[in-house]
Every structure is written in C-alpha cells, then in structure tokens.
Amino acid sequence: MFNFRVLAVIKRELMEKLFSKAFITMTLLVPGLIFVLLGIQALLYSSEKKNLRIDIISESSELTAAFQDDLLNSDYVKSGKYVFSFQTMNKDELKKYLNGKKQELLDEKLGGIIYIPTSAMKNKKLEYYAKSSQNISLFKDLDGPINKTLIDLYFHNKTLSKEELDFARLGVDFTGFKVSENEGIKEEGYGNLVLAYLFTFLLYMSMLMIGQMTMQSVIEEKGNRIVEVILSSVSPTELMTGKILGASLTGLIQMAIWLSPVVLVMSTTIFVLPKEFLFSIDATVIIYMLINFFIGLLTFIGLFAMLGAIFDNPQDASSGTMPVMMLMIIPFFIALSMMEDPNKPIAEVASLFPFASIIVMPARMTLVGVPFWHLILAFIINVLTFVAIFPIAGKIYRVGILRTGKKPKWSEVVKWLKYKY
C-alpha cells in the first residue's frame, strides 16, 4: 500500500496545503484569535456602564446609615462605577416609590433599586427592582460590601474585637496542591486549567478544519473529473492513503506551530508568569498529545474523505457529516466539563473510549495524574479504531470516488462494502 506513488500523493497534498493561503492564514490566525477573544473579554469588562445609579432603600434608619457609611467608601464608588442614593421607607412606601420611578427604570436612567428589609438581619434576603432583574455583575460586586455591613450590624452589640469581625467577613480561599506519584506533592495554580482549555479547543478545531478541507478537496476533484486523471496513475486506495497522510502531516505541523509558545515557556526562563498561572507539565505530555492528535487526524480525515467520495457537492455532504461531527462534539463537551471536576467518572471512561479518547485524554492528563497503563491503553484503542475504520472507509472511497449523479442512499452505500475488487 505504501509505495512511491503514495509518497507522490503525500508530497502533492503537503505542497498544496502547506503553502495555501488558507493554511497560512489559519495557522497565524488561531493564536491571534485566542488573544483577540481574551482582549474582547477584557474590553467587555472594561466597557461596563459607569456611574450606574442605584437606589439603596432600607426599612430602618439604622440600616440606611450603616450602608451609607460603608458603600460610599467602597472602591466601586471611588472608581465611578456606581452612584448610590440612600433612603428609609417601609414596604407600603416602597410600592409608591416604585410607581414613581417606573419610567426611569424602563428608560434605564435609574439602574436599579435595592430594598433591604429588617428581616435581612436574619436571612440576608434582599429585593432588587430593575428593567433586567438578573444583574449578575451587580450582585457579584455588591455581595461583599453588603454582607460586610450586615455582619457588622449583627455583631455590633456583641463583645467581638475588630480582628474577630474581620475574620467573620473573610471568605474561604483554597490553595491547590497536586498529589502525583512521580512528583509528590506540589502547589499548582490555574495554568494547567488554562492549558486544558487550550488543548481541547485546538484539538477539536484543528481536526474539524483539516477534515472539512479534505472532504472539500475530494468533492472538488470528483466534481471536475480531475480524480479520473489521477486514478490513471494511482489506485483509489493509494490516492486515499496519500491524501489522509498528507492532510494529517499538515495538521501535525500546524499543531506543532500552535504549541511552540507552550514549549518555549516550558523550556526557558525568559517568560515569567504570575505564580497563580504557572503550569506543571513535562515534555511527555506534549509529545503524547501530538502522537495522539496524529492518530486522531488519520481516523477523522479518513471518515471525512469517505464522505467526500460519497457525495457530489458540499450541500449533500453536510447532511452526512453530522454523525462524524457528533464523534467530536460530544468528547469536546466532556473535556470542557472536566474543568469543573477532572475526576468525573464519565471523563475517565471517555478518555479510554474510541474516538472520544483523542480529545478527552490530553485534557485529563493535563489536569490530573493519569496511570501509565491508561495512556498505553488509550493509545492502543485509538490505533485499533483507525485500523478498523480505514478498510471500511477505503472500500466506500473506491466505489464512491467514481460515481456521480444521483445522491446515493445510505442503504446503497452499505452495499458498496460488499463489492469485490
């Protein structure tokens, strides 16, 4: 199967894809896109409304005075993010006040009204009135200052020192220590969590992009009859093998370029990251990921090439890609769910499951210590998956690549597997 004709097809694929504008653009664009997304996120936070008017209404003058003293001295007022006004009124007076302020709330001239009843001293339940009643950002900002004021008032007449009150107001702060068999116990920041996100995103996007490009290439060659000329020199199996290997090598080179900044940070002391963003992975993780990614490319590109041979145009092919897409989408979401709890049983099962292992295992080994035999088993499973898929995809490709006209039914495609050559 692997001969000089296959090498010629591989060379053709590499030359066609490596020097294409699409490959160069995407290779440079993805790292830039990541920075742009981070920049947009920062911009969204920095472009929040300034001088947002919030009315703080309490049911007792004691509450009003306490909140006025604390909130007017808060960082949110000093930075100009919020402008507070304070009043005291009971529930009936509040209803009349809301009717008078209704238009201002609807016009967003008034950001919202927070009502603090005296019962808040027991259950800390407040009421918020606004055009949009679920302002998560505001709730997050004011949770600490309001909680501090309520705690101060609650313990006001009790014999507690300032230090004891400060302690009562403190939240719980976890420092994570990773326990591993080889490295023992080691403090770990959020760096590995960021890397797990990065690996998951890049693996999913690259396999999808390279697979779609290969499918499109097969459809174009089939549609303009170039494939008939090519098949006069090579067999369908040799052509498919060369296309899959060429596209997979292209994807591997692209992934190596994308991961080069991570390797650079790991191997040099030029870049000093904040302590909380330091990551602790070694070169074996990167090497395993690249090998795992290459096997994944071989598998999925084989499936996309098969789909390209079945259909005559991208519109028909899009209907057939959904099953293949689900083999990537489901593991992608499983890998993302690991960011909350890396020890989920479904994540461990998926990291050893055909197709899913390609995306889930790199995220898992970045977040937790994975037994060596799990890595070997996942590697064997991925290789066996490719070995099982390739003959099936090859048979369908050999028949479909020369068939044009009516869109075939799936029952007809299954019959292609029974053809003898």
Image (cartoon, grey):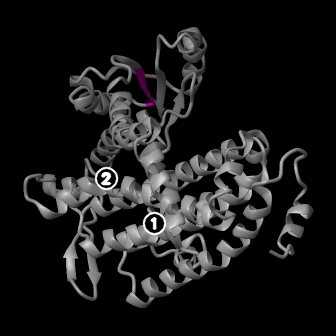
Residue 297 makes an appearance in the image: no
Q: Is residue 303 left or right of residue 55?
A: right
Q: Are marks 2 and 1 in contact (CB under 8 Å)?
A: no
Residue 233 makes an appearance in the image: yes
Residue annotated with mark 1 = 293
Judge the density around disc 2: few (<14), some (14-19), many (≥20) Cα neighbours within 10 Å. Answer: some
In the foreground, 87 or 193: 193
Q: Is residue 176 left or right of residue 100?
A: left
In the foreground, 374 or 163: 374
**Alpha-carbon span between mark 2 and mark 1:** 14 Å
Q: In terms of image quadrants, where is residue 286?
A: bottom left
Q: Compared to 41, does 323 lie above or below?
A: below
In the foreground, 227 or 370: 227
- Please say whether residue 95 is one of the residues in the magenta stretch: no
Amino acid, disc 1: Phe
Question: Mark 2 vs mark 1: which is more N-terminal?
Answer: 2
Tell me where residue 261 appears, x and y as whole percent: 24, 53
Tell me where residue 152 appears, x and y as whole percent: 27, 46
Q: In terms of image quadrants, where is residue 312?
A: top right
- Magenta-drawn segment: 54-59
Residue drawn at (28%, 82%) of the image: 179
Dot 2 falls on a residue whose secondary structure is helix
In the foreground, 89 or 321: 321
Q: In which quadrant is the C terminus drawn?
A: bottom right
Q: Compared to 355, does 268 lie above or below?
A: above
Secondary structure predominantly adopted by residues drawn in magenta: strand
Amino acid, disc 2: Ile
Which disc number belongs to residue 257?
2
